[in-house]
Image (cartoon, helix red, strand yellow):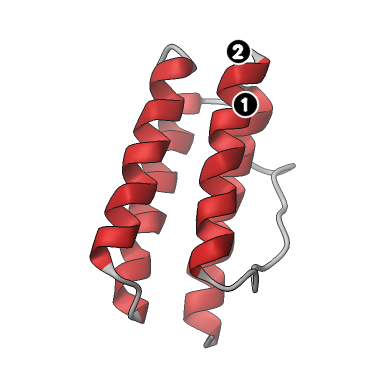
């Protein structure tokens, strides 16, 4: 994994983790954490650390940023279908969260 790929993955994971932290209930939080598990699985569990302290609390902004970062992972050779399935799971988590 090159540096740009690692940075994009770290951003995607950070935004999704922030959504999990800000979720309205445990079910929504767990759904966002399943998105993290999918991202980790796609990368063979080689995932950069997370830092969610500096991110804002606007869940709509976090969702849009997470979506953009996940879509950008296709630039690094990930299967577009796998990424589309991650995005579907992210949308389902967002729906559980009432966004």
Query: Where 70 falls versus 26 (above or below)?
Result: below
Residue at point 33%, 64% (across, down): 72
**x and y percentages locating residue 39 in the rendered image:** 51, 58
Q: Could you tell me residue 92's position as x and y percent? A: 38, 28
Query: What is the secondary structure assignment of the residue under circle 2?
Result: loop
Tell me which corner region of the image, top left, top right, bottom left or bottom right, holds residue 54: top right
Q: Is residue 33 above or below residue 26?
A: below
Mark 2–mark 1 CB contact (< 8 Å): no
Residue 89, numbered label: none
- Assign a secondary structure to mark 1: helix
Q: Which image quarter is the N terminus in?
A: bottom right
The residue at 37%/67% (across/down) is: 73
Query: Where is mark 2, residue-wise?
Result: 24
> Residue 77 vs residue 49: left or right?
left
- Asked if residue 26 lies left or right of residue 94, the reply is right
Q: Quadrant of the C terminus?
A: top left
Residue 56 appears in the figure: no
Closer to the chain start, of discs 2 and 1, is: 2
> Total number of numbered labels?
2
Q: Is residue 74 visible?
A: yes
Q: Residue at x 48, y 66 (%)?
A: 42
Q: CA distance from mark 2 to mark 1?
A: 8 Å
Picture quadrant where residue 40 is located: bottom right
Number of the front mark, 2 or 1: 1
Give the labeled residue for mark 1: 29
Q: Residue at image x 33%, y 60%?
A: 82
Question: Could you say where residue 64 lies in the image, as x and y percent from the top left?
Answer: 36, 39
């Amino acid at each position: 994994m090159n540096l740009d790929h690692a940075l994009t993955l770290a951003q995607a994971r950070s935004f999704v983790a922030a959504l999990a932290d800000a979720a309205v209930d445990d079910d929504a939080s767990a759904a966002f954490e399943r998105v993290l598990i999918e991202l980790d699985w796609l990368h063979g569990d080689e995932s950069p650390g997370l830092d969610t302290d500096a991110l804002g609390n606007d869940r709509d902004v976090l969702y849009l940023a997470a979506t953009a970062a996940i879509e950008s992972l296709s630039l690094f050779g990930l299967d577009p279908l796998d990424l589309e399935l991650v995005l579907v799971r992210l949308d389902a988590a967002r729906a559980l969260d009432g966004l």
